[in-house]
Each structure stands twice: as structure tokens, then as C-alpha cells.
Image (cartoon, coloured by chain):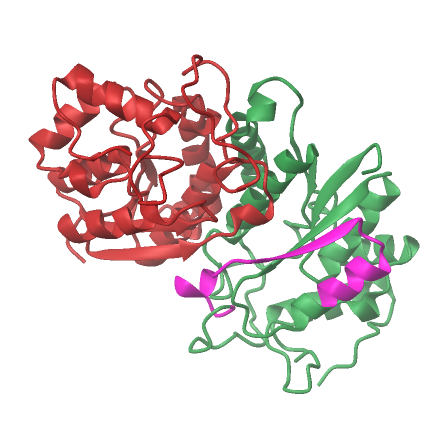
Chain colours: A green, B red
Amino acid sequence: MVSKSAIVLLSGGLDSATTLAIAKQEGFGCYAMTFRYGQRHSGEIEAARRVACAMQAAEHRIVDVDLAAFGGSALTDVKLAVPKDRNSLNQDIPITYVPARNTIFLSYALAWAEVLGVWDIFIGVNALDYSGYPDCRPAYIAAFETMANLAIAKAVQGQGYLRIQTPIIEMSKAEIIRKGVELGVDYALTHSCYDPAPSGQPCGHCDACRLRLKGFQEAGLTDPLEYA
Amino acid sequence: MVSKSAIVLLSGGLDSATTLAIAKQEGFGCYAMTFRYGQRHSGEIEAARRVACAMQAAEHRIVDVDLAAFGGSALTDVKLAVPKDRNSLNQDIPITYVPARNTIFLSYALAWAEVLGVWDIFIGVNALDYSGYPDCRPAYIAAFETMANLAIAKAVQGQGYLRIQTPIIEMSKAEIIRKGVELGVDYALTHSCYDPAPSGQPCGHCDACRLRLKGFQEAGLTDPLEYA
């Protein structure tokens, strides 16, 4: 392990790839962690593998988490349709919300952090250009951090303070993309679409695609992905 | 679903069986949730099945959680020995501590609670006759509850307040056993041992066995289990 290490949650999307780049730039050796949580498609996992490899993560763990067993989200239940071309971006909480997803992911990261002796967990949540999910907001992240430091033995014993690092939480999508390009992120490796075509190409119409395309447009850049 | 429902974390041990009985007595329809988390032995899971069945849980989910992938605990790593006849019960945090275990378990319960529309999660943690685990203390539980109400959409939208209920947190083991007997819990169905004999019989020497035996003794009752 290098002297300063962190766990980075890596979904394979644009935000988490940029977050990994920022953690690396800050000098952290990065342990990437991806969840196979019953997503409708495996494109995200493959993208996470490509990103972890390209950005030389110290290790990349893919953890199985069966959120589909509980249902309740269009991202894990093929019977629910992914909304397309919604007008109300940033307003309601859409059906692509997965109950307690970030809490479960951060809890696994907490377990791995304690075993590795790592005190920083990076997560690419964003509360500006986002889908309105409650577990992406600063107040939630702060409450998780407080809880985490009461949960793990090493923190309770005073060996350190665990930080949940959210470097892109207040950035616009355009700012995230500009930052990533500056740090050499290859966005051709990433995957954002909630409901890709059978070819694997992004749909261009779900919230994730629309936020991504808007971000590239506002950044004055071209998305390297080909859309269906 | 009955009018008032709760999720009850059920390990198959004495504490969680008593907690389930208390939730039932309080009028909750109980959704039991057990985790197969890479325990060294499957006795706990079988005990949880027996208890859920005997106590007529509305549903019993067994969720796979691969904590053994991270290691760091004698409960999930057969290379680490379970301590026997420790003198320092209630003092140090022993190697049977599993990093972030209750945080991961409660996070899954939170997901299921939101999908079911349930606002109460019962967990049989105990901060008195316990092994010194940090994630059994009232301060930790309170912090988890605060975080949970910032995490899930239904709480953030004001539809309700999620409670983490810990009815036995301040009881002695003897008090827990007396309460359970009063409520008709059959402790012959439960399993507490960290390191049972090949026959499945409890060892009588690990922290869990010693706390259990001490509890029955102080309650003036006989443990119905046969020890190896």
C-alpha cells in the first residue's frame, strides 16, 4: 500500500471516473470498489473495469449485492420502465431511485476501509446536475460520516477519523467534465446510460444520458460515446 | 401486511429471538431478515429459520453478504482462531468483531423497509452484557437513525420517520432471558456459539457461549442447549 490510500466507489460512469482521477491527483493510492447490484445491464461493470485498469487502481473489487431482491426501482426491476425525456429533471425523485443504494455501498466501503486501514472513502455523488436522489446530498454524506466514526473499532479507539470525500458534489456536469479532461480521463471508457440499446450503445433519452449530453454541450466538448 | 409492520434483524441467537418476541408483543407484523455473511458455520442460519417459523414471521429473507471477502474477523476467516475463556469480557474489542457488520445489515434493512413502506427496524444489539463491539452502542444506533432519515426518499419527502428500535440494548443477559421466557421464546431453537463442535453443539468457551451461560445462571434458569 502506498503511504496514503483511499477507497473509491467506481460505478463506471462519468462522475465516479472523474472522482477517481481527483483522488489520484491528490496523491492517494486508490482501491476501487464496484457493485453488481442487479442492474438491468452489465455495461456499467465493464466500464468500471476499463476505468480501473486505465487509471491504475491498486486493486479493483467487484462486490455482489442483491438489491434486485427488494425491487422498488426501475434500475433493478425490468418490469418498471426507465423514464425518457423527463421534463422535471432535478424536481421529483424518479423511479430510477434505488432505496438505500448509497448507504449500502458506503457501508461495504467502510468495512473494506477498516480492514485495509484506510481513512478516506471517495464517492462521486453530485447534488447539482443530478436526478434528485436524497442520498447524494451533503447533509446525507455528513450524517453517514458521523455514523461511520461511531461504527468502526479503529475510529472509536481513536486511531483516526474516517472521511467521506465528495470532491464533485457541488460541481456542474460541465465542470466535472472539464476537470476530468484536464486530469486525462478518457470518457470513451465510461458508461452512463440507464437503459442502453441491445448494441450496448447509450439511449440518449434517460436522465443519465441527458445530464451527460447537457454537460458535454455546456463544457463546449463532444461526448466520445456513440449514441443509439 | 398487517396495519403495523416492522423489519426484525434475526441472527438466530438469543438476543435477536427475544427482540422478535418483543416486536410481536408490541403488535408489529414482523419481516425477519437474516444474513449469510461468510460465517464459519451455518448453525446460525438454521437457527434463524427455526425461530422465524416458530414465531410466525410474516416473511423471512436470507440475504447473502460476502463479508468474508474483506476478512479481518475471526467470525469470517477460518485462519483466525476464535478466542476462548477470555478474561477481559466487556473490555477490549475482540477479533470476533466484524468490521461495519451492523452498518451493512441495517443498510439492507433500510432498503427493504423503504420498499415495504415500513418505518420500524428492530435490532437486538446489547451494550451491557456484550463483546465490546462499537456498533452495538446507543450513540451508534442514534447516528444510524439520523443518517437513515436523510437517506431514503420517503423520509426526506416527509412521509414518515424511520426508527431503529433496540428494546434490549440496556438489559442484562439475565433480563433478556427472563423477558423472552415470559413471552414464550423457545431458546432451544436458538444458537449463540461462535465456534461450535463438528456435531453442531456449542463450545461453551467462546465469548458468546460464556455470556449466554452466565445469563441463564443469573436468571436462575437452565439453558436448554446441550454443550459439547
Q: How many marks?
A: 0
Question: Could you say which is closer to the camera, residue A10 or residue A73?
Answer: A10
Q: Going 88% across and 43% down the picture, which residue do you hit?
A: A25
> In this view of the protein, can residue B221 be seen by the observer?
yes
Q: Is residue A105 left or right of residue B59?
A: right
What residue span does the magenta drawing correspond to? A47-75
In the image, is residue A107 part of the stretch drawn in magenta? no
Q: Is residue A71 visible?
A: no
Q: Residue at x 28, y 19 (%)?
A: B170
> Which residue is drawn at the image coordinates 82% and 42% (left, top)?
A29
Along the viewing direction, whichever of B183 and A37 lies nearer the viewer: B183
Give left or right: position of B147 versus B211: right
Task: Locate residue B124: give its quadrant.
Answer: top left
State whether residue A62 is above or below residue B22. Answer: below
In what quadrant of the picture does the C terminus of chain B appear?
top left
User: To which quarter of the image does residue A166 belong?
Assistant: top right
Observer-nearest of B144 and A158: A158
The quarter of the picture where residue A164 lies is top right
Where is B118 relative to A146, above or below? Answer: below
Percent x, y for residue A81?
48, 77
Residue B188, position as x, y percentages in the image: 17, 39
Pick whichever, A106 or B41, lies toward us: B41
Residue B75 picture location, percent across and down: 47, 38
Q: Could you tell me which residue is drawn at 65 percent across and 30 percent down? A: A162
| Rendering coords of residue A60 (x, y %) | 72, 54
Q: Is residue A72 magenta?
A: yes
